[in-house]
Image (spheres, coloured by chain):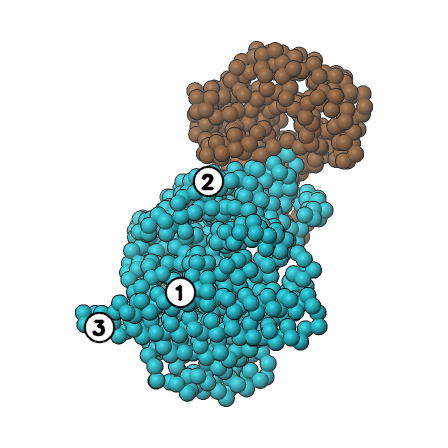
Amino acid sequence: MTERTARLRELSLKAKPRISSERAALVTEFYEKNLGLYSPPVMRAKTFYYLCERKTIYIGEDELIVGERGPAPKATPTYPELTCHSIEDLYILNSRPKTSYAVDEECIKLYAEKIIPFWRGRSIRDRMFGLLPQEWKDCYEAGIFTEFMEQRAPGHTVLDDKIYNKGMLDFKKEIAEAMAGLDFINDPRAYDKLEQLKAMDIACDALILFAKRHAELAMKLADNSESETRRKELLKIAEVCSRVPANAPRNFYEALQYYWFCHLGVITELNGWDSFNPGHLDQHLLPFYQKGIADGTLTYESARELLECFFIKFNNHPAPPKVGVTAEESGTYTDFANINIGGLLRDGSDGSNEISHLLLDIIDEMHLLQPSSNIQLSKKTPDALLKHALRVIRKGYGFPSIFNVDAVIQEQLRQGKTIEDARAGGCSGCVETGAFGKEAFILTGYFNLPKILEITLHNGFDPRTKKQIGLKTGKPEDFKSFDELFNAYQRQLNHFLEIKLKGNHLIERLYATEMPAPFLSVLIDDCIKKGMDYNAGGARYNNNYIQMVGLGSITDSLSAIKDIVFEKRKLTLSALVNILDRDFQEAEEVRQWLLNRTHKYGNDDDYADSIMRMVFNACFEYLDGKPNAKGGCYRVEMLPTTCHIYFGKVTGALPDGRKATLPLSEGISPVQGADRNGPTAVFKSAAKLDHIKTGGALLNMKFSPDLLKTEEGIDKLAQMIRAYFRMDGHHVQFNVVTRETLKKAQQNPEQYRDLIVRVAGYSDYFCDLAKDLQEEIISRTEHQKF
Amino acid sequence: MRSGLVFNIQRYSIYDGPGIRTTVFLKGCPLNCLWCHNPEGILPSRQIIVFESRCVSCGKCVEICPTLQEKPRSRQHYVGGERGKVRPISVLKVSECRLCGDCVEVCPSRARQFTGVEYGARELVQEVLKDRMFFEESNGGVTFSGGEPLAQPEFLIEVLKLLKREGIHTAVDTCGYAPQEVVRDVAKETDLFLFDIKLMSPELHRIYTGVTNELILENLALLNKIHNNIWIRIPVITDVNTDQREITAMADFIRSARSARQINLLPYHKTGIAKGKRINIDSNPLEFDTPSDEILERIKNILSKTNLPVKVGG
């Protein structure tokens, strides 16, 4: 870091997230004046223009890359047209212990007097809950599934390389051509398309205006600047902001600033999930970098400083405030912009380059919460890049995560994309696969697999909300075999997926018709060509995901039932359900048996792993290929974010020995502590899932820093990852644990059963070690500061 | 088909030879080193092993035990240990145990387990091949350790042959105390020896390990002639084999070993003590000091005259 970026970083870290009511006030003002005057897309475009025209422009001291979504770093706007927060919501946001946002009295007053009176009943969330059927609401309240679009717009997309070749003026030309090509005689929807295209055109103007206001402020600040150095920097900022985004960028600086304006445009227009994302940043920047180095206008150091300024911008932007279930399923300030490093080029050759390493160095040095980062590893990616990444990972930040490009491409080919579009794609958010710049790949909600077993074991009844929300598939004593029980589970699963899908269609159409995203549509192919909005199916590809949660928990639960009820017959199913209903009270021995003496997923044990495949196949058979409302299909995703905690809270005791309300397993990782055969066995089990049939599958692993201390340790981890990817694994990420974690592991061993530590000449499970040995290892770890 | 007695199969072993390996621990060892870190591998027969921290004090093992004469009448009676915890192992004296396994069968938390499982050669091969993908990516393979793998020679050789057919790299981690013909036969089938040298003085060797070292050193000399890939492993035990004379003698001996490729120093660690208590809670083995970095550095220096790479750790 330079002194400048160190100061900017400090400022970003210290700034406390707070709610800015400016956006809410401007949007409300505009809607009050103009409601009913325009078609929805034009209304949205003009709202966006109004915001770009009037919002406070911020240029901080020291900054080289400029632009904030709010009036200052971490001042976070609200989106009352989507979610109209109540006064109570605002108080909760202000005071909750985790992920709070400061709310001032002025904001509360504005909400009470202006925002709430206008938006209550009009916001998408209010309308959605008014339209959704009771059966949907019952399932939602029971914790069968969550709904991504109840507080946030779809979003979930990533930019490709188009902005590095085209300015907004070029996009305006394309829009004009599309308008000229409309056939008002043979295409009865030509007028709809015209409105969409008009809206996109206005959105382009809005972003140009937004940049121009930055240029003007920079000029003004330059005039008043006492420092000659800063005056020159401000003049440079003014020059860059006058050039982009109207025109294509000419150099490294303009390229970064241009992306950043697009990013701000997308997250100002709506609060789409996963904010937005530059995608293959290293590939996009390489030509500008090489040109700058060659003509002497750029050095490694100046490029690095600009990139550092760029990274800090992401960190200045916490996720929009989430409340209720949405806050539970995604309880983090992170907004999931996830930079892809490495990968392949469109022609199939290795896409990693010197900027890939530069990005890793920056991630390593700055270790900011945002942006997230990942390595896109293909069989063509040099080991040097993987090892560089592992040297960052071993410091214990949990990033970058590692993706298997060769699997990601196969997944996309299966979804019907061209090989070039697939290669230019990658992963975003947490682990989602998508074709960058050409796809709406929408997460629609988490789905609680173990809860459905609980419902099945109670003949369709939810013991917590005391409602018959499922089908009557039989009482526990009715099931004569494991297959009969699994059959009932599958019927319940399909029943709940059906309710979820019906709700999704309704919500999707609501966004398509009422809440288009004209600015985002400019950036994603083929919205301009089709004259169709991103939220309505304008993108070239439209895959929707439902994210399955608790694969390990459901597998181990079914495996335990199969083993002790139907095979060993130690217990009848009704007796087991009875014990579960009492949350194992007076039945600790049974719980220990379930925990320790049944087959568990994650041990390369086919008994359990084959049940995992049955569960996955059941999800896949029902969901994959079902149509969504944008002309695309549904796909299965295996991702929890923080939802396994929330789903755990609403799920009773499970047959795998887990007590009621405790977390479920996450992603495709084994149940916490259930894997006892080491990391290779976990990889083997995880690879028995057919990753190519998913749109992403998240695997978490914990390692002690000791295992990665030496270069040899790094080598072996790299080789292990290569082997997992040879088996088509989609993704893996590593927690390299610290002393604090080991301490916690000592206090709550059950939650840390899978923690592997190097003891001496061998590795062992930390929790199996005698207390004194644990102490010894804790003291060892303490000395290891990397 | 031969069968063998295995007390552990450790996947992702990364310190027992090159690459990512699966280490198979064969039960039974002719030595009885006072610092042994795998004491459950010494006896060439099954044993019951107890993980005290996993015990939930249900008392099932005590109830079912056919040997135990005086059974506590109620749950209350088991509760004698710390904070009301049952300590079943202290009730069941190892010497009286007939290894019927009833207590293992009823234990809900796997606090009581057998150590030592019979494997057929093919069955074992099938098990270790599970990580083939990892061996291939890392140029790893399978290591046989123990206990003493050469103490089950027919089984070992059969498994080594089967693995060779599968193209898997193998290593044998040995204390070197075995008949010469066994060493000769195994040398034909394995790619690498991890050969322990503990002490050069025969008398001290006898005191600390139970046997003298002539056969061991002869076997190493023999291997030098018939095998070309040996890694020397030296357990470093403070004040046992850390003095100048011992190490210098080792260095001189190793210098003559043409097939030695590297030296690994394995610093003493105290895991053996906790493990010893798993087979016999009343055991009271000697405790040594873990060698300091200075000691290791000094030893490394002396051994450097062998011109072989010297590594601390596996």
2 or 3: tag closer to the N-terminus:
3
**Which amino acid type corresponds to the residue marked 2 in the rendered image?**
Lys
- Where residue A447 sits: x, y (%)? 40, 60
Residue A702 higher or lower than B209, as above or below: below
Residue A170's disc number: 1
- Shown in cyan, the chain is A
SS assignment at label 3: loop
Assess disc 3: are there few (<14), some (14-19) or many (≥20) residues with their C-alpha within 10 Å of its C-alpha: few
Residue bearing mark 3: A184
Residue at left 61%, top 42%?
A708
Label 2 – label 3 distance at C-alpha: 50 Å
Tell me which numbered mark, 1 or 3, is placed earlier along the sequence: 1
Image coordinates for residue A453, horizontal then vertical, percent: 38, 57
Indicate whether B69 appears above or below A584.
above
Q: Nearer the viewer, residue A734 or A402?
A: A402
Identify by letter the chain in brown.
Answer: B
Chain under disc 3: A
**Res A380 label:** 2
* Residue that extends furthest to the front in the rendered view of this protein: A295
Q: Secondary structure at mark 1?
A: helix
The three-letter amino acid code for the residue at tag 3 is: Phe
What is the x, y in percent for residue A668? 45, 50
